[in-house]
Amino acid sequence: MKKRQDVYDLYWYFACERQNIFWKKLNGEEAPWTEDEILQTYKFCNSYRVNDRVSQYLLKKVIYNEKKYNDEDMIFRILLFKLFNKESTWDLLINEFGDVTLKNFDIQRYSKVLEKAISSGTKIYNDAYISCATKAFGYDRKHDNHLALLNKIFNIDKAHLKILRAKTMEEAFNIIKSYPLIGNFMAYQLVTDINYSDVANWSESEFTVAGPGSLRGIKKCFIDKGKMSNEDIIKYMYEHQEEEFKRLGLEFKRIGNRPLQLIDCQNIFCELDKYCRQALPELKSNRTKIKKKYVPKKDKIEYIYPTKWNIM
């Protein structure tokens, strides 16, 4: 493989500086948390995916709330939340039904609540990434097709039982990916989120999928991948992170003693692509601008992590 060295080094700089911002905010320091004007101005995801706002909401409200759920309800809750990927949509369903479980899941009732929200001008999907919107189950509305998808997975096919028996993340990924409306990127996100819970304990270092943004970042970072696949490149970054931070004199402050995982290295490529649109605009891709400016949130996040990670 042949690196574009300045961009390759920028990958590690970005990972470290974005993590420094995370720690400074967590410690209550006043803005600005960085001298980097691009990071000051635009919104970027955390170096660790789990620290992003939606992931934290998933952990606190969907997975590790005060109630206990059986394994099938846990997978159902995670998939339902992630198909919409929006906190307010989950809140809407909780307020209407009291809880979200397979027992109270009814396509028509859920659809009615969501349709009412749409009619009032409420967005029910997060635009962080675009979920597939074909009429795979014959409905005109996107949310109705997604509800029908959940019904097929859980009530018709009982596919959650296969997921629970899966020995690896890749095996579970292939089960989920086999369904309509779920592509490679979405399936990878879903198995990652299932693995945050206690119903699975798959190795995170054996399997990854390069999403669309990650592909753009890899292309900017490497002039030639040689015989390596995009996933091989992500694994290369995962395996060499310590030596690269050391080579560049960067002090990367982990959460606990947890290095960046494959999902994190994949995401950082996506954020690198965004960063380069401002830092190195001569590196062309099909995206030329960063959509969102950084807007500080007033509420402070109390961070939690999957119990099996043993991060205090």
Image (spheres, helix red, strand yellow):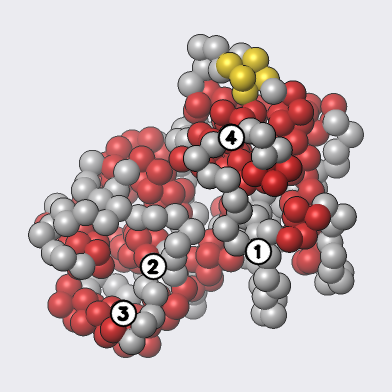
Query: Rounded to the nearest whole Å, what is the CA distance between mark 3 and mark 4?
Result: 37 Å
The label on residue 125 is 2
Q: Which of marks 2 and 1 is in front?
A: 1
In the image, what residue type sits under mark 3?
Ile
Q: Earlier in the sequence, mark 4 or mark 2?
A: 2
Q: Can residue 63 be seen in this view?
A: no
User: In what element is the residue under mark 1?
Assistant: loop
User: In what element is the residue under mark 2?
Assistant: loop
In the image, what residue type sits under mark 1?
Lys
Q: Position of residue 80 (x, y in %)?
A: 33, 65
Query: Rounded to the nearest whole Å, what is the CA distance between mark 3 and mark 1?
Result: 26 Å
Q: Which of marks 2 and 1 is nearer the N terminus?
A: 2
The residue sitting at 77% across, 60% down in the picture is 40
Q: Are marks 3 and 4 in contact (CB under 8 Å)?
A: no
Q: Earlier in the sequence, mark 3 or mark 4?
A: 3
The residue sitting at 50% across, 28% down in the picture is 231
Residue 21 vertical position relative to residue 87 in the rendered view, above or below: above
The residue sitting at 79% across, 66% down in the picture is 25
The label on residue 118 is 3
Q: Read off the residue under disc 4.
A: 284
| 269 displayed left or right of 125 | right
Q: Earlier in the sequence, mark 1 or mark 4?
A: 4
Write down the quadrant of residue 226 in the picture: top right
In the image, what residue type sits under mark 4?
Lys
Query: Rounded to the nearest whole Å, what is the CA distance between mark 4 and mark 2?
Result: 29 Å
Q: Read off the residue under disc 1.
A: 293
